[in-house]
Amino acid sequence: MIICAYNFAVMATRYEKVSGVVDYAEVMVGRKYGYYFAWFMAVIYFPAMTSVVAWVTARYTAVLLGWDIAGPQAMTLAGLYLIGSFTINAISPMLAGKFQVTTTVAKLIPLGLMAVVGTIYGLRNGVMIQNFTSGAIVEVSGNPLFTAVVGTCFAYEGWICATSINAELKDSKKNLPRALMFGSVFVVFVYALYYVGLAGAVENEVIMAGGETGAKIAFSTVFTNVGGTLLFVFVVISCIGTLNGLMMACTRSFYAMANRGEGPASHIFSNVDKVTNMPTNSAIMGVFMAALWLTYFYGANLVETSWFGNFSFDSSELPIITIYLMYIPIFFMHIRKEKELPVCSGSSCLFWALAPVCLWCWLPLFLWEKRLFITVLFSLWLWCWDAF
């Protein structure tokens, strides 16, 4: 993540148009590639990630309120969070930006306290040493390394959303690279210490068995029930902030195409409200796509019998794997054109994107199991729709 963020930071110092990563794809690889990249971001990546984070936020809220995290309450809250985040961004982009800053600061409170106090607590009672010296905790179905790679990708994904507002930033050629580099390094550093603190709070078995509940147990163990509950409120707030950041990008994704005169009904999606300075029509389409992906995520992953049969996959995995594949041509062309981008950028993306393929022995089996061909077919359908 840090290597990719650095390379996009280099590009951000030179190119500034409408939508960061789409601009870089267009300049480096070509107009057609930028067009396909914009489609992918608009109809798959941003809405899929936004819907999953809305669901995650709802689950943490359900844990806080003592509700069933797998019941209808969580899905209802997920829909509420999705619409609420859209409302803030559509009505007042400036308010959404200030809310993002506030939630970022709020996020650091529980993370920092758990990193410091949890580590001290774990060293004193021996839990941390036990956790770091114990063997396997649970049996993982399939390939455990693949599960870990995908989980890590999802945990640290979302930084690319910052490039979607590059045209709205003050002196973006200076501030966006700083945000990408400092933010990426800082996030990795803070979350690494946070997970060390969690390892000092409770046994690994508790975290693995409880998921979101396990995190609340860890806070309550270290900071008492009252203090743990209060800090867990900040955890929920941080999730809402993450959702708000993704919604910022999601609501602008169709505008990124329309502003170039591309995509369906570009004259509609390029319209910007004179009062709010927000591409309202693009925002409406963005939240609609997110709602579709939330419905798909529920029907494919959260019910006993999948609604989609063999066409079911985890929408928190496939978009991330695919986008790292799509970064590779951008970095390679940057190396070729400007001859100053480290080769490690392409190599790192290649690892994140193809590690699952190597781990699953056969490419055809991987394509079938993860439904990667759906992305290809869907992209072709969108191209035909726009072309004809």
Image (tube, rainbow, N blue to C red):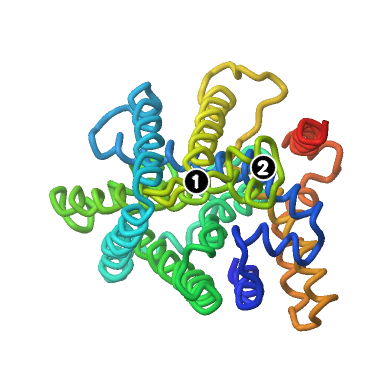
> Is label 1 or label 2 in front?
1
Observer-nearest of 218 and 234: 234
**Is 353 placed left or right of 192 in the picture?**
right
Q: Position of residue 137 (x, y in %)?
A: 50, 48
- Label 2 sits on residue: 318
Residue positioned 61% across, 17% down in the render:
307
Vertical placement of residue 84 versus 98, above or below? above
- For the residue marked with disc 2, what is the amino acid? Leu
Q: Position of residue 150 (x, y in %)?
A: 62, 50
**Is 318 placed left or right of 284 in the picture?**
right
**Is 294 placed left or right of 80 in the picture?**
right
Q: Position of residue 318 (x, y in %)?
A: 66, 42
The numbered mark, 1 or 2, whose residue comes first in the sequence reads 1
One can see residue 372 in this view? no
Vertical placement of residue 306 versus 134, above or below? above
- Label 1 sits on residue: 279
